[in-house]
Amino acid sequence: MAEIFMEDVTKTFSVNGVLLSVLDGVTVQVEEGEFVSLIGPSGCGKSTLFNIICGLTTPDRGRVLLGGHDNVPAGEVVSYMPQKDLLLPWRTVLDNVILARRAVGRERAAVQSEARELMPLFGLTGFENSYPAELSGGMRQRAALMRTVLARQRVLLLDEPLGALDAITRTRMQQWLLKVWNNFKQAVFFVTHDIDEAIFLSDRVYVLTSRPAKVCLHLSVSLPRPRRAKLVTAPSFLALKKEIMRALQVQ
Ligand SMILES: Nc1ncnc2c1ncn2[C@@H]1O[C@H](COP(=O)(O)OP(=O)(O)OP(=O)(O)O)[C@@H](O)[C@H]1O
Ligand SMILES: [Mg+2]
């Protein structure tokens, strides 16, 4: 049974009386433990699609099943890292990363100690008591991701989590993200603009058209894991890249 099953979803916004058609019959799914990417032009409706999965936006047509059911609260299945990292500036790193667990009392102490143990994996050791303003961009993103992972839901929705990083840091973070994914075994639904990143990380990739978004390509990435940086120059990788570029009509 799919963790996320979104069928024929259509959404039109009304902005000052003007209709803006954003999603047009989008069908996507994410299976247990899978890494699936969503790629598409800026403004095509990727974040809207995530907001619909989370129940923050209501579709005009179509249905969304989470764990096979259509009326479960999204928070019981998915954990969402929105495009902006949304760390609370007045809370320390430790308090930010345990936020999604809503723990109190003794349980809070247990969650805190779990978070402390995970600090090395997230490269945040020594920064537990720092505030977000004292972190680099990459560290903020790792803290936001740690919060999303620590919520311990079956699916992580990550909306361009590596978007603000330079190319070198980003490549390192991709490797690291696969390590985290391997560790926690949660399914990941991942938005990116970067074709190499989508292929490198994923089991499957959905490519969307410009607005109103439709799925124009659905690709299985059967490259072996673990994936190493040099994979991006392999002919099998480049063939997939060409296919996605063709779908996005990038010359
Ligand atoms: N709540 C809203 N009300 C009205 N229009 C909206 C709303 N949310 C999104 N839009 C519009 O829907 C379109 C798609 O926005 P969305 O944020 O989903 O795109 P995106 O694919 O995530 O873009 P990007 O790659 O730049 O993040 C945009 O034109 C945006 O202005
Ligand atoms: Mg977006």
Image (cartoon, grey):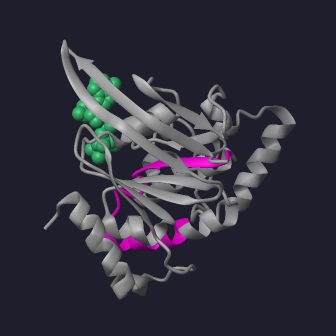
Is 48 placed above or below 71 here? below
User: Which percent across, then down, holds residue 33?
Assistant: 64, 58
Residue farthest along the left direction in this orientation: 251
Determine if residue 116 is in view. Answer: yes
x 64%, y 68%: residue: 182
Q: Is residue 89 visible?
A: no
In this view, the residue in front, 184 or 216, is 216
- Check the image and report above or below for 18 versus 179: above
Magenta part of the protein: which range?
A: 153-177
Front residue of 184/207: it is: 207
Would you say 244 lies left or right of 227 here? left
Q: Would you say residue 140 sits in the magenta stretch? A: no
Query: Residue 25 versus residue 241: which sits nearer the camera?
Result: 25
Ligand 1, image quadrant it occupies: top left
User: Viewed as shown, does residue 153 lie left or right of 43?
Assistant: right
In-image side of 183 versus 235 (left or right): right
Q: Is residue 160 magenta?
A: yes
Above or below for 80 versus 240: above
Using the image as rendered, state which of residue 124 and residue 167 is in the foreground. Answer: 167
Image location of residue 11, percent across then percent down: 35, 28
Residue at the image position 71 percent from the left and 33 percent from the top: 102
**Location of residue 237 (image quadrant):** bottom left
For residue 218, which quarter of the picture? bottom left
Image quadrant occupied by the C terminus: bottom left
